[in-house]
Image (spheres, grey):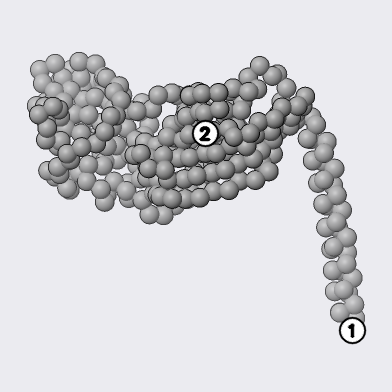
Amino acid sequence: MGISILAIVGIVGWHSTDCTNHRVNLESEMTNSIQRFFVVGDTFSGTARHIDGLITETDALEKVLTSVHLDTDVHLYLQQGVDMRSLYAAVRHFNTTNGKAGGSFNLVSCKRAPRSTRRFAHKNRAENIVICAPRRVSDTLFEMDLCFSAQNEFFLDHMTGMHIQGMALIEAARQAFLTVTEAFFLAEDERDYYYVIKSMETGFQNFVFPFDAVLRYEITRASHKENRHGFDADITIIQAGTVCTRVSVAFTAFEAKTIADRELVVAQECLNKLVEQYRDEEALQSISQVA
């Protein structure tokens, strides 16, 4: 039996049968006693350690590799931080060699699009791209899944608590407005653009955990000129039906060659002011030493 990629509809009726290994069975006639495990990247081992039914990628891989026969199907629900390649290979091997006479493993993911691209998200390293490619819902409304890698720059130092830190969510909002603008409004424009944020207001209503979550991006104002495009947008991050984060942003995409000249002038003016400031401080320091 091959691997099936399913959509998560809901979570109901969990019953823990082994808290040590976080094994959870869903007792339901409709599911035929399918075993279900939610899988997060090893970065979130602290979260998995405290929540029944949640295991790390390494735990899931070991479970597949050490299994010889399954009495029932096992569904592995892939959440944040999971590199699917190793699990895919292990599951495929098991289902091909051992799954014909009994149950099989199934990788389950709700993500409906691949990770956004380096060009759209303006990141050099793929692991630092935290959103999937956007889906257009209407002329002004877009959706995209969050897709945090275990090697993401925000997780390389330390994790506080079990939730995803707020700065990582702000970065998701930033990548969202960049990606939507590049993919849907500048796709046929061959010029390079430079983005300037005018304002960004953020509110956190609830923790976001390393589970599936959706970002909704709605444009509330748009203006277009020959060499610039301005937008106001409201961004919400939703997890399990709850709005967790709200971001309101105003930004402008300038033609790069236009803003580069202006930026150079402002940078030189700033440096000149600092030179004068340091000269004044050095003069005062010299007078104090003489006195």
Q: Position of residue 210 (x, y in %)?
A: 37, 42
Residue that numbered label 2 is attached to: 217
**First reached walking from the N terminus: tag 2 or tag 1:** 2
Residue 263 visible? The answer is yes
- Residue at (32%, 50%) from the top-left corner? 46
Name the quadrant containing residue 256: top right
Q: In the figure, is residue 203 to the left or right of 242?
A: right
Q: In whole angstroms, how far apart are the C-alphas of marks 2 and 1?
A: 63 Å
Q: Amino acid at mark 2?
A: Tyr
- Residue at (40%, 49%) from the top-left corner? 207
Residue 218 to residue 153: above or below: above
The dot on residue 291 is: 1
Q: Amino acid at mark 1?
A: Ala
Q: In the figure, is residue 190 to the left or right of 275?
A: left
Q: Position of residue 196 (x, y in %)?
A: 69, 39
Give 224 or 6, whichever is nearer the viewer. Answer: 224
Give 207 or 41, whichever is nearer the viewer. Answer: 207
Quarter of the C terminus within the rendering = bottom right
Q: Position of residue 236 (x, y in %)?
A: 48, 40
Give 267 or 62, whichever is nearer the viewer. Answer: 267
Question: SS at mark 2?
Answer: strand
- Residue at (17%, 40%) from the top-left corner? 14
Badge nearest the viewer, 2 or 1: 2
Question: SS at mark 1?
Answer: loop
- Residue at (18%, 17%) from the top-left corner? 97
